Structures are given as structure tokens and as C-alpha cells.
Amino acid sequence: MPTYTFRCDSCERVQELVMPISRYCSEPPRPQCCERAMQRVFLAAPGLGVISEAHYEGLRASDGTDISSRAKHRAYMREHNLTTIDDFTETWKRAARQRALRMQGIDVERPRDIAQAIDKLGGEDVAPREGS
């Protein structure tokens, strides 16, 4: 059964919940801490939190390149135009903020969409047609 991990942004407390996927989808958990909802976090290895340097010990890329430390691994990934899941942390945070605003009825992209529509129409003032 999957383990779902949540972390409090205020005190960094971690809580793990074990539940079937069907229940998670039908009744998403909303654990609270410090009077706020805890954020779901995705871990590389359940229960470990972060990957230690020991994880890289003796590690080699598929082409045989030594990537036995985090620095070597990151350098290899950069050189070969590859990415890891943690490269998207800021992207996911930004998307989460936008989702939260949308759930409050605020669409941050609406002004840009309106400006694009006006530009597409040639920037002309659009007067309503008679009878509309």
C-alpha cells in the first residue's frame, strides 16, 4: 500500500499516511499542523527524506562514467542535458501557487490572455455590434 508523506512548512514536522490509492483519490487526506494544512512531499525513497551521499557510492552512469557523488552526478546530468526530479521543485511550487489562486477565483493568466486577444484583433477598440 502506498505511503503518502506530508510536511509542515512552519515546523518541518513530517507525517506519513498509509492508504490505498482509491481512498487517497476519493478522500484526499488534509493533515493539519501549526493550524495550517501540511504540504504533500515526494521523496526519492519512502522514509528516508533525502538521498545521502552513501546513495552515490560506487554509482556509474550507463556509459561507465563515475558519478559516485552528488556533485559528479549533477555535472554529468548537466553535460548530457538530462534532468532529475528535484530540478522541477520551483516549477511545481509556482504551479501550486497558481492553482491555489485559481481555486480562490483568481486567474493570474487572464490579463495576459485578454492582452493577446486584443493584439490578435489588431489592438483596435472593439465596439459591440448593433443588436448584441
Image (spheres, rainbow, N blue to C red):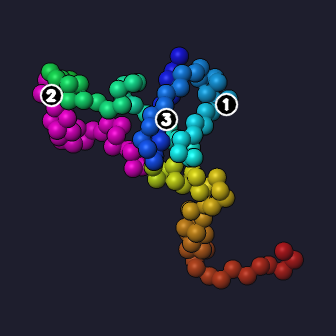
Kindly identify the residue that appears in the image at 63 percent across and 61 percent down.
106
Kindly identify the residue that appears in the image at 54 percent across and 55 percent down.
98
Q: Is residue 17 visible?
A: yes
Residue that badge 1 annotates: 27
Which amino acid lies under the numbered mark 3 shown in the image of this protein?
Phe
Rounded to the nearest whole Å, what is the CA distance between mark 3 and mark 2? 30 Å
Observer-nearest of 4 and 128: 4
Q: Magenta span has 77?
A: yes
Whether pointer 1 and pointer 2 mark residues with C-beta atoms closer than 8 Å, the reply is no
Observer-nearest of 40 and 103: 40
Q: Is residue 12 left or right of residue 65?
A: right
Residue 6 is tagged as: 3
User: What element does badge 3 sit on?
Assistant: strand
Which amino acid lies under the numbered mark 1 shown in the image of this protein?
Glu
Observer-nearest of 34 and 109: 34
Rounded to the nearest whole Å, what is the CA distance between mark 1 and mark 3? 15 Å
Which amino acid lies under the numbered mark 2 shown in the image of this protein?
Ser
Q: Magenta span has 23?
A: no
Of labels 1 and 2, the one closer to you: 1
Q: Reading the chain from its start, which is encountered first: label 1 or label 2?
A: 1
User: What element does badge 2 sit on?
Assistant: loop
Residue that badge 2 annotates: 68
Q: Is residue 117 visible?
A: no
Q: Is residue 82 above or below residue 52?
A: below
Q: In the image, residue 132 lies at what x, y percent? A: 84, 74
User: Magenta residues, as a range?
Assistant: 63-92
Which residue ends up furthest to the top in the rendered image?
A: 1
**Label 2 neighbour load within 10 Å: few <14, some 14-19, many 20+:** some
Q: Is residue 54 above or below residue 11?
A: above
Q: In the image, residue 44 lies at what x, y percent? A: 36, 29
Q: In the image, residue 113 lies at what x, y percent? A: 58, 65
